[in-house]
């Protein structure tokens, strides 16, 4: 297994996959269904807002607005794996657009259900769904993107 491509090089993991099942019971049966990437230095969260987010897998992308959940997000349907990039401030792709690895798809924000709310909640929620989807795994098909198995698109 090679080095894992992150959607934001140099980011700090502020919340790991599977953490805090008591908080995420509405979204997942077993805990946090992604990895939260935040400012490398926690006190620099204001400067972090608007940082570019790159695709880690190729495929067809859509973007959507989910005010009570992921906020502004991009979902990439790939061949082996689907990718979620949530809580964006801006989207840089069009619905149905083909995206390539390394392409900038949006910017970090704090939209939707971010904790704490407001600028201090600025982070990227990054999710990975390998195919075939296993929606019965307790995480709605999501698996830990830091394991690196889906990074080839």
Image (tube, helix red, strand yellow):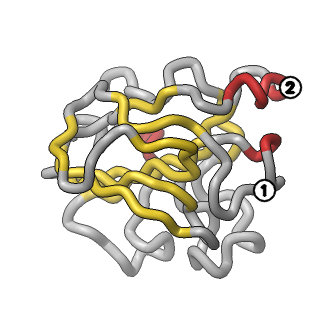
Q: Which residue is drawn at 30% across and 42% down?
A: 93
| Left or right, 142 with reference to 28 | left
Q: What element carries label 1?
A: loop
Q: Nearer the viewer, residue 26 or 72?
A: 72
- Where is residue 15? Give x, y as percent: 68, 46
Number of numbered discs on residues: 2
Q: Which residue is drawn at 49% across and 27% down?
A: 52
Q: Is residue 132 above or below residue 148?
A: below
Q: Which of marks 1 and 2 is nearer the N terminus?
A: 2
Q: What element carries label 2?
A: helix
- Where is residue 136? Give x, y as percent: 39, 80
Q: Residue at x 81, y 28 (%)?
A: 42
C-alpha span from label 1 to label 2: 15 Å
Q: Is residue 42 above or below residue 138?
A: above
Quadrant in which the C terminus is drawn = top left
Q: Is residue 54 above or below residue 62?
A: above
Quadrant in which the N terminus is drawn = top left
Find residue 69 and report its image quarter. Answer: bottom right
Q: Residue at x 70, y 22 (%)?
A: 40
How dense is the environment of label 1, judged by Cα within 10 Å: few (below 14), some, or many (20 and up)?
few
How dense is the environment of label 2, judged by Cα within 10 Å: few (below 14), some, or many (20 and up)?
few
| Left or right, 123 with reference to 84 | right
Report the disc number at residue 115: 1
**Residue occupied by mark 2:** 43
Q: Which of 143 and 45 is in front in this view?
A: 45
Q: Is residue 153 above or below residue 140?
A: above
- Where is residue 114? Give x, y as percent: 71, 56
Report the disc number at residue 17: none
Find residue 23 and report its image quarter. Answer: bottom right
- Where is residue 106? Give x, y as percent: 44, 38
Find residue 33 and report its image quarter. Answer: bottom right
């Amino acid at each position: 297994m090679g080095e894992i491509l992150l959607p934001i090089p140099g980011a700090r993991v502020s919340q790991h996959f599977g953490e805090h099942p008591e908080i995420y019971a509405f979204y997942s049966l077993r805990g946090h269904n992604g990895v939260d990437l935040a400012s490398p230095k926690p006190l620099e969260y204001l400067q972090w807002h608007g940082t570019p987010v790159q695709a880690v897998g190729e495929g067809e992308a859509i973007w959507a607005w989910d005010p009570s959940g992921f906020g502004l997000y991009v979902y990439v349907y790939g061949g082996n794996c689907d990718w979620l990039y949530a809580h964006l401030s801006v989207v840089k792709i069009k619905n149905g657009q083909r995206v390539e690895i390394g392409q900038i798809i949006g910017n970090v924000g704090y939209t939707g259900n971010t904790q704490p709310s407001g600028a201090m909640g600025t982070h990227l929620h990054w999710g990975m769904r390998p195919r075939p989807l296993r929606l019965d795994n307790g995480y709605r098909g999501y698996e830990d993107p830091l394991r690196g198995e889906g990074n080839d698109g």
